[in-house]
Amino acid sequence: MKKFRKAWLFGYRRIIKRRAPHTWLSWRFVLPVGHVADTPEFKLHRKVFFHAWRELPRIVYAALVIVSTPYWYVWAGPQAYRRLRKRIAKSDESAPVLFAQKGLFHSKEYKQSERQAIARGVSAQSFSVLKLYQIPTEQWWQYVPNDLLPHWHRTWQGPVSNAVADIMANKRTFAEFMGEHNLPVVSSVPLIPDHQAWQKMLSDPAPDWFLKPEVASQAKGCLILTLNQDQQVVLRSKDGAIELLEETDIEHYLREAFVAQRYLLQPRLVNHPLLEAHGVEGDLVVFRVVTLRMTSGEILVWRANMEAPLARNVAVEFHRVDVVTGVIADLDKLCVPYWPELRDVVSRAHTEVTELHSVGWDLAITAQGPVLIEGNINWGTNPMQGKGHGPLLDEHYLQVINEI
Protein backbone atom coordinates (compact mmCIF):
# COMPACT_ATOMS: atom_id res chain seq x y z
CA MET A 1 0.00 0.00 0.00
CA LYS A 2 2.83 2.39 0.88
CA LYS A 3 4.61 1.66 -2.41
CA PHE A 4 1.40 2.30 -4.34
CA ARG A 5 0.84 5.60 -2.51
CA LYS A 6 4.45 6.66 -3.15
CA ALA A 7 4.14 5.82 -6.86
CA TRP A 8 0.83 7.70 -7.08
CA LEU A 9 2.27 10.82 -5.41
CA PHE A 10 5.28 10.73 -7.72
CA GLY A 11 3.07 10.47 -10.80
CA TYR A 12 0.71 13.16 -9.54
CA ARG A 13 3.52 15.64 -8.91
CA ARG A 14 5.53 14.77 -12.03
CA ILE A 15 2.63 14.45 -14.49
CA ILE A 16 -0.67 15.92 -13.36
CA LYS A 17 0.78 18.95 -11.57
CA ARG A 18 3.53 19.57 -14.14
CA ARG A 19 2.77 22.33 -16.63
CA ALA A 20 4.97 20.92 -19.38
CA PRO A 21 6.03 17.42 -20.42
CA HIS A 22 9.25 15.83 -19.23
CA THR A 23 12.40 17.09 -20.95
CA TRP A 24 10.59 18.71 -23.85
CA LEU A 25 8.88 15.49 -24.93
CA SER A 26 8.50 14.87 -28.64
CA TRP A 27 7.92 11.86 -30.83
CA ARG A 28 10.88 13.20 -32.85
CA PHE A 29 13.27 11.83 -30.23
CA VAL A 30 12.18 8.28 -30.99
CA LEU A 31 11.25 8.66 -34.66
CA PRO A 32 13.28 11.60 -35.97
CA VAL A 33 12.18 12.93 -39.33
CA GLY A 34 14.28 14.69 -41.97
CA HIS A 35 17.63 16.41 -41.67
CA VAL A 36 16.96 17.57 -38.10
CA ALA A 37 18.09 14.16 -36.80
CA ASP A 38 21.64 14.90 -37.95
CA THR A 39 21.99 18.29 -36.27
CA PRO A 40 24.18 18.48 -33.12
CA GLU A 41 21.50 20.48 -31.28
CA PHE A 42 18.90 17.75 -31.80
CA LYS A 43 21.34 15.09 -30.59
CA LEU A 44 22.00 17.08 -27.41
CA HIS A 45 18.27 17.31 -26.66
CA ARG A 46 17.80 13.63 -27.41
CA LYS A 47 20.56 12.67 -24.98
CA VAL A 48 18.88 14.70 -22.23
CA PHE A 49 15.57 12.98 -23.04
CA PHE A 50 17.05 9.50 -22.65
CA HIS A 51 19.14 10.42 -19.59
CA ALA A 52 16.35 12.08 -17.61
CA TRP A 53 15.35 10.69 -14.22
CA ARG A 54 18.44 8.49 -13.97
CA GLU A 55 17.47 7.67 -10.39
CA LEU A 56 14.41 5.83 -11.71
CA PRO A 57 14.38 2.36 -13.23
CA ARG A 58 14.11 2.79 -17.00
CA ILE A 59 10.84 0.90 -17.08
CA VAL A 60 9.34 3.42 -14.65
CA TYR A 61 10.63 6.33 -16.73
CA ALA A 62 9.22 4.70 -19.87
CA ALA A 63 5.85 4.43 -18.12
CA LEU A 64 5.98 8.14 -17.25
CA VAL A 65 6.71 8.98 -20.88
CA ILE A 66 3.89 6.76 -22.13
CA VAL A 67 1.40 8.34 -19.73
CA SER A 68 2.52 11.97 -19.92
CA THR A 69 2.86 12.18 -23.70
CA PRO A 70 -0.83 11.65 -24.58
CA TYR A 71 -1.80 13.66 -21.51
CA TRP A 72 0.13 16.61 -22.95
CA TYR A 73 -1.12 16.24 -26.52
CA VAL A 74 -4.77 15.59 -25.67
CA TRP A 75 -5.28 17.84 -22.66
CA ALA A 76 -2.47 19.82 -21.01
CA GLY A 77 -0.89 21.27 -24.17
CA PRO A 78 -4.04 22.58 -25.88
CA GLN A 79 -5.32 23.89 -22.54
CA ALA A 80 -2.07 25.77 -21.82
CA TYR A 81 -2.11 27.51 -25.19
CA ARG A 82 -5.80 28.28 -24.90
CA ARG A 83 -5.08 30.06 -21.61
CA LEU A 84 -2.21 31.94 -23.25
CA ARG A 85 -4.50 33.20 -26.03
CA LYS A 86 -7.08 34.33 -23.48
CA ARG A 87 -4.41 36.15 -21.50
CA ILE A 88 -3.14 37.90 -24.61
CA ALA A 89 -6.67 38.83 -25.67
CA LYS A 90 -7.33 40.46 -22.29
CA SER A 91 -3.99 42.27 -22.13
CA ASP A 92 -3.54 46.00 -22.65
CA GLU A 93 -0.75 48.55 -22.63
CA SER A 94 -0.07 47.83 -18.95
CA ALA A 95 1.26 44.42 -20.03
CA PRO A 96 3.54 45.45 -22.91
CA VAL A 97 4.93 42.00 -23.71
CA LEU A 98 1.51 40.45 -24.15
CA PHE A 99 0.15 43.58 -25.82
CA ALA A 100 2.88 43.33 -28.46
CA GLN A 101 1.78 39.77 -29.18
CA LYS A 102 -1.91 40.60 -29.49
CA GLY A 103 -1.66 41.50 -33.15
CA LEU A 104 0.31 38.36 -33.92
CA PHE A 105 -1.62 35.45 -32.50
CA HIS A 106 -4.41 35.68 -35.10
CA SER A 107 -1.91 35.31 -37.94
CA LYS A 108 -1.45 32.11 -39.91
CA GLU A 109 2.26 32.01 -39.03
CA TYR A 110 1.55 32.26 -35.30
CA LYS A 111 -0.98 29.44 -35.41
CA GLN A 112 1.46 27.21 -37.29
CA SER A 113 4.15 27.93 -34.69
CA GLU A 114 1.70 27.16 -31.91
CA ARG A 115 0.85 23.80 -33.42
CA GLN A 116 4.55 23.01 -33.73
CA ALA A 117 5.10 24.03 -30.10
CA ILE A 118 2.37 21.68 -28.88
CA ALA A 119 3.77 18.88 -31.05
CA ARG A 120 7.22 19.36 -29.54
CA GLY A 121 5.96 19.70 -25.97
CA VAL A 122 7.01 23.33 -25.45
CA SER A 123 5.19 25.00 -22.56
CA ALA A 124 3.14 28.08 -23.34
CA GLN A 125 5.30 30.12 -20.97
CA SER A 126 8.54 29.23 -22.76
CA PHE A 127 6.88 29.73 -26.14
CA SER A 128 5.91 33.26 -25.09
CA VAL A 129 9.08 34.25 -23.20
CA LEU A 130 11.45 33.00 -25.91
CA LYS A 131 9.18 34.34 -28.68
CA LEU A 132 9.55 31.12 -30.61
CA TYR A 133 6.74 32.24 -32.92
CA GLN A 134 9.24 34.69 -34.42
CA ILE A 135 11.89 32.02 -34.99
CA PRO A 136 11.97 29.36 -37.76
CA THR A 137 11.06 26.00 -36.24
CA GLU A 138 14.26 24.37 -37.51
CA GLN A 139 16.17 26.71 -35.20
CA TRP A 140 14.17 25.83 -32.10
CA TRP A 141 16.61 23.06 -31.14
CA GLN A 142 19.20 25.76 -30.45
CA TYR A 143 17.04 26.91 -27.52
CA VAL A 144 16.81 25.21 -24.14
CA PRO A 145 13.56 26.18 -22.39
CA ASN A 146 13.12 26.00 -18.64
CA ASP A 147 10.87 23.01 -19.29
CA LEU A 148 13.97 20.82 -19.53
CA LEU A 149 15.27 21.70 -16.07
CA PRO A 150 16.82 20.16 -14.05
CA HIS A 151 17.55 17.35 -16.52
CA TRP A 152 19.51 19.57 -18.89
CA HIS A 153 21.96 20.72 -16.24
CA ARG A 154 22.27 17.25 -14.73
CA THR A 155 23.28 15.88 -18.12
CA TRP A 156 25.65 18.65 -19.20
CA GLN A 157 27.03 19.91 -15.89
CA GLY A 158 29.16 16.83 -15.47
CA PRO A 159 29.69 14.96 -12.18
CA VAL A 160 29.42 17.19 -9.12
CA SER A 161 31.00 16.20 -5.80
CA ASN A 162 28.92 16.20 -2.63
CA ALA A 163 31.09 18.97 -1.18
CA VAL A 164 30.50 21.36 -4.08
CA ALA A 165 26.81 20.41 -4.26
CA ASP A 166 26.46 21.33 -0.58
CA ILE A 167 28.27 24.66 -1.08
CA MET A 168 25.90 25.61 -3.89
CA ALA A 169 22.72 24.35 -2.21
CA ASN A 170 23.17 25.55 1.37
CA LYS A 171 23.19 29.35 1.80
CA ARG A 172 25.14 29.23 5.07
CA THR A 173 27.80 26.89 3.68
CA PHE A 174 28.07 29.05 0.56
CA ALA A 175 28.60 32.26 2.54
CA GLU A 176 31.20 30.64 4.81
CA PHE A 177 33.10 29.03 1.93
CA MET A 178 33.24 32.12 -0.27
CA GLY A 179 34.05 34.33 2.70
CA GLU A 180 37.02 32.12 3.56
CA HIS A 181 38.30 32.76 0.04
CA ASN A 182 38.13 36.54 0.49
CA LEU A 183 35.07 37.03 -1.70
CA PRO A 184 32.44 39.62 -0.69
CA VAL A 185 29.43 37.87 0.81
CA VAL A 186 26.61 38.97 3.04
CA SER A 187 27.23 37.98 6.65
CA SER A 188 24.94 35.15 7.69
CA VAL A 189 24.35 33.70 11.14
CA PRO A 190 21.96 30.90 12.08
CA LEU A 191 18.74 32.24 13.57
CA ILE A 192 18.13 30.31 16.78
CA PRO A 193 14.49 29.28 17.35
CA ASP A 194 14.50 30.67 20.85
CA HIS A 195 12.22 33.18 22.58
CA GLN A 196 15.09 35.21 24.03
CA ALA A 197 16.90 35.40 20.67
CA TRP A 198 13.73 36.64 18.98
CA GLN A 199 13.11 39.16 21.75
CA LYS A 200 16.61 40.55 21.25
CA MET A 201 16.05 40.80 17.51
CA LEU A 202 12.65 42.49 17.90
CA SER A 203 13.92 44.95 20.53
CA ASP A 204 16.51 46.36 18.13
CA PRO A 205 15.73 50.12 17.91
CA ALA A 206 16.29 50.08 14.15
CA PRO A 207 15.81 46.49 12.91
CA ASP A 208 16.69 45.92 9.26
CA TRP A 209 17.07 42.18 8.75
CA PHE A 210 16.60 39.62 6.02
CA LEU A 211 15.57 36.14 7.14
CA LYS A 212 16.47 33.47 4.64
CA PRO A 213 15.98 29.69 4.63
CA GLU A 214 19.28 27.81 4.57
CA VAL A 215 18.04 25.77 1.61
CA ALA A 216 15.53 27.41 -0.72
CA SER A 217 15.09 28.81 -4.20
CA GLN A 218 13.22 31.65 -5.93
CA ALA A 219 12.91 33.63 -2.67
CA LYS A 220 10.51 31.07 -1.21
CA GLY A 221 10.17 31.50 2.54
CA CYS A 222 12.24 34.69 2.65
CA LEU A 223 11.20 37.27 5.26
CA ILE A 224 12.05 40.92 5.94
CA LEU A 225 12.07 42.43 9.44
CA THR A 226 12.23 46.21 9.40
CA LEU A 227 10.41 49.41 10.34
CA ASN A 228 7.41 50.58 8.33
CA GLN A 229 6.48 54.18 7.55
CA ASP A 230 4.92 54.53 11.00
CA GLN A 231 8.17 53.37 12.63
CA GLN A 232 6.55 50.10 13.72
CA VAL A 233 8.44 46.82 13.62
CA VAL A 234 6.96 44.74 10.79
CA LEU A 235 7.69 41.24 9.55
CA ARG A 236 6.67 40.66 5.95
CA SER A 237 7.23 37.89 3.48
CA LYS A 238 9.19 38.65 0.33
CA ASP A 239 6.01 38.44 -1.77
CA GLY A 240 4.11 40.77 0.57
CA ALA A 241 1.45 38.15 1.30
CA ILE A 242 2.32 38.15 5.02
CA GLU A 243 2.65 41.38 7.03
CA LEU A 244 2.70 41.15 10.82
CA LEU A 245 2.97 43.99 13.36
CA GLU A 246 2.18 42.39 16.70
CA GLU A 247 5.18 40.92 18.52
CA THR A 248 3.26 37.80 19.55
CA ASP A 249 2.10 37.24 15.95
CA ILE A 250 5.66 37.60 14.69
CA GLU A 251 6.98 35.10 17.23
CA HIS A 252 4.19 32.65 16.44
CA TYR A 253 4.87 32.93 12.70
CA LEU A 254 8.62 32.37 13.18
CA ARG A 255 7.98 29.38 15.40
CA GLU A 256 5.77 27.82 12.72
CA ALA A 257 8.32 28.62 10.00
CA PHE A 258 11.09 26.88 11.95
CA VAL A 259 9.12 23.65 11.93
CA ALA A 260 9.69 23.37 8.17
CA GLN A 261 13.24 24.71 7.80
CA ARG A 262 16.18 26.49 9.42
CA TYR A 263 16.76 30.19 8.85
CA LEU A 264 19.72 32.51 8.49
CA LEU A 265 19.76 36.07 9.79
CA GLN A 266 21.37 38.62 7.47
CA PRO A 267 21.59 42.40 7.43
CA ARG A 268 19.24 43.64 4.72
CA LEU A 269 21.28 44.79 1.75
CA VAL A 270 20.58 48.23 0.31
CA ASN A 271 20.82 48.94 -3.40
CA HIS A 272 23.49 51.23 -4.80
CA PRO A 273 21.96 54.75 -5.20
CA LEU A 274 22.03 54.43 -9.00
CA LEU A 275 19.88 51.29 -8.74
CA GLU A 276 17.45 52.40 -6.05
CA ALA A 277 14.92 53.67 -8.59
CA HIS A 278 14.62 50.14 -9.97
CA GLY A 279 13.76 48.56 -6.61
CA VAL A 280 10.26 48.39 -5.15
CA GLU A 281 9.60 49.29 -1.51
CA GLY A 282 13.27 48.83 -0.76
CA ASP A 283 13.46 45.35 -2.32
CA LEU A 284 16.83 44.32 -3.66
CA VAL A 285 17.81 44.54 -7.30
CA VAL A 286 19.64 41.30 -8.11
CA PHE A 287 22.08 40.57 -10.91
CA ARG A 288 22.15 37.06 -12.36
CA VAL A 289 25.46 36.37 -14.11
CA VAL A 290 26.30 33.07 -15.79
CA THR A 291 29.94 32.03 -16.06
CA LEU A 292 31.34 29.17 -18.14
CA ARG A 293 34.51 27.20 -17.59
CA MET A 294 36.07 26.90 -21.02
CA THR A 295 38.28 24.05 -22.24
CA SER A 296 41.32 26.29 -21.78
CA GLY A 297 40.48 26.65 -18.09
CA GLU A 298 39.49 30.29 -18.59
CA ILE A 299 36.37 31.47 -16.76
CA LEU A 300 34.15 33.28 -19.25
CA VAL A 301 31.61 35.83 -17.98
CA TRP A 302 29.02 34.75 -20.52
CA ARG A 303 25.60 36.36 -20.01
CA ALA A 304 23.95 38.60 -17.44
CA ASN A 305 20.60 40.07 -16.48
CA MET A 306 19.44 42.65 -13.99
CA GLU A 307 16.39 41.35 -12.12
CA ALA A 308 14.23 44.28 -11.09
CA PRO A 309 11.60 43.31 -8.47
CA LEU A 310 7.93 43.84 -9.19
CA ALA A 311 5.62 45.30 -6.55
CA ARG A 312 4.27 42.80 -4.01
CA ASN A 313 5.55 39.89 -6.04
CA VAL A 314 8.54 37.55 -6.02
CA ALA A 315 8.49 37.82 -9.81
CA VAL A 316 11.02 40.08 -11.48
CA GLU A 317 11.46 41.96 -14.72
CA PHE A 318 14.61 41.00 -16.63
CA HIS A 319 16.93 43.50 -18.29
CA ARG A 320 19.85 42.28 -20.38
CA VAL A 321 23.27 43.53 -19.27
CA ASP A 322 26.15 43.78 -21.73
CA VAL A 323 28.70 41.54 -20.03
CA VAL A 324 31.65 43.55 -21.36
CA THR A 325 30.53 47.12 -20.67
CA GLY A 326 27.86 46.64 -17.99
CA VAL A 327 25.41 48.76 -19.99
CA ILE A 328 21.66 48.02 -19.91
CA ALA A 329 20.36 49.19 -23.28
CA ASP A 330 16.63 49.06 -22.47
CA LEU A 331 17.09 51.25 -19.36
CA ASP A 332 18.35 54.32 -21.20
CA LYS A 333 21.81 52.76 -21.43
CA LEU A 334 22.21 52.61 -17.66
CA CYS A 335 25.81 51.73 -16.78
CA VAL A 336 25.82 49.29 -13.87
CA PRO A 337 28.07 50.56 -11.08
CA TYR A 338 31.08 48.45 -10.08
CA TRP A 339 30.66 46.25 -13.17
CA PRO A 340 34.40 45.43 -13.61
CA GLU A 341 34.52 44.49 -9.92
CA LEU A 342 31.43 42.29 -10.33
CA ARG A 343 33.02 40.48 -13.27
CA ASP A 344 36.11 39.86 -11.16
CA VAL A 345 34.06 38.53 -8.23
CA VAL A 346 32.14 35.94 -10.29
CA SER A 347 35.31 34.85 -12.11
CA ARG A 348 37.14 34.33 -8.81
CA ALA A 349 34.13 32.55 -7.31
CA HIS A 350 33.98 30.09 -10.22
CA THR A 351 37.69 29.28 -9.82
CA GLU A 352 36.82 27.98 -6.34
CA VAL A 353 34.32 25.48 -7.79
CA THR A 354 36.05 24.64 -11.05
CA GLU A 355 34.46 21.21 -11.38
CA LEU A 356 31.25 23.04 -12.38
CA HIS A 357 31.02 23.78 -16.08
CA SER A 358 28.51 26.61 -15.64
CA VAL A 359 27.18 28.59 -12.68
CA GLY A 360 24.40 31.16 -12.38
CA TRP A 361 25.57 33.68 -9.76
CA ASP A 362 23.24 36.04 -7.89
CA LEU A 363 24.76 39.30 -6.68
CA ALA A 364 23.65 42.60 -5.19
CA ILE A 365 25.43 45.89 -5.81
CA THR A 366 25.59 48.19 -2.79
CA ALA A 367 27.31 51.53 -2.32
CA GLN A 368 30.39 49.57 -1.20
CA GLY A 369 30.47 47.28 -4.25
CA PRO A 370 29.18 43.86 -5.41
CA VAL A 371 28.12 41.21 -2.91
CA LEU A 372 27.70 37.50 -3.67
CA ILE A 373 24.33 36.17 -2.60
CA GLU A 374 24.37 32.62 -3.97
CA GLY A 375 25.46 30.37 -6.81
CA ASN A 376 23.10 28.15 -8.79
CA ILE A 377 23.91 24.90 -10.56
CA ASN A 378 20.37 24.54 -11.92
CA TRP A 379 20.08 28.11 -13.22
CA GLY A 380 17.07 29.13 -15.29
CA THR A 381 17.64 29.08 -19.04
CA ASN A 382 14.70 31.15 -20.31
CA PRO A 383 15.96 34.50 -18.94
CA MET A 384 19.38 33.89 -20.49
CA GLN A 385 17.88 33.47 -23.96
CA GLY A 386 15.35 36.30 -24.07
CA LYS A 387 15.89 40.06 -24.26
CA GLY A 388 18.29 39.73 -27.19
CA HIS A 389 20.59 37.12 -25.64
CA GLY A 390 19.88 34.59 -28.36
CA PRO A 391 19.78 30.78 -28.13
CA LEU A 392 21.63 28.99 -25.37
CA LEU A 393 23.54 26.75 -27.76
CA ASP A 394 25.99 29.32 -29.06
CA GLU A 395 29.66 28.66 -29.80
CA HIS A 396 30.77 29.25 -26.20
CA TYR A 397 28.19 27.00 -24.56
CA LEU A 398 28.69 24.27 -27.17
CA GLN A 399 32.41 24.33 -26.43
CA VAL A 400 31.67 23.68 -22.74
CA ILE A 401 29.31 20.81 -23.59
CA ASN A 402 31.75 19.22 -26.02
CA GLU A 403 34.24 18.99 -23.14
CA ILE A 404 31.99 16.59 -21.24
Image: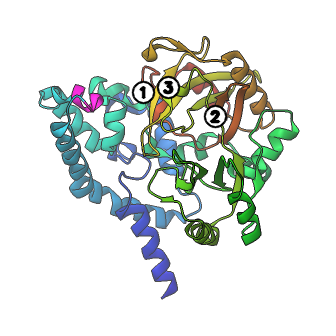
Of marks 1 and 2, which one's residue comes earlier in the chain?
A: 2
Q: Is residue 163 visible?
A: yes
Looking at the rendered structure, the kind of residue marked 3 is: Ala
Looking at the rendered structure, the kind of residue marked 2 is: Val
- The residue lying at 47 percent from left, 30 percent from top is 41
| Placement of 290 over or under 1, stated as above or below | above
Is 22 placed left or right of 260 in the picture? left
Residue 185 belongs to magenta span: no
Give the residues in magenta: 94-100
* Camera-side residue of 202 and 377: 202
Q: Residues within 10 Å of mark 2 (few under 14, many from 20)?
A: some
> What residue does disc 1 label?
386
Position in image of residue 106 (x %, y %): 12, 31
User: Are dots 2 and 3 in contact, CB under 8 Å?
Assistant: no
- The residue lying at 39 percent from left, 59 percent from top is 65
Q: Which label number is shown at residue 270?
A: 2
> What residue does disc 3 label?
277
Q: Secondary structure at mark 2?
A: loop
Q: Main secondary structure of the magenta part?
A: helix
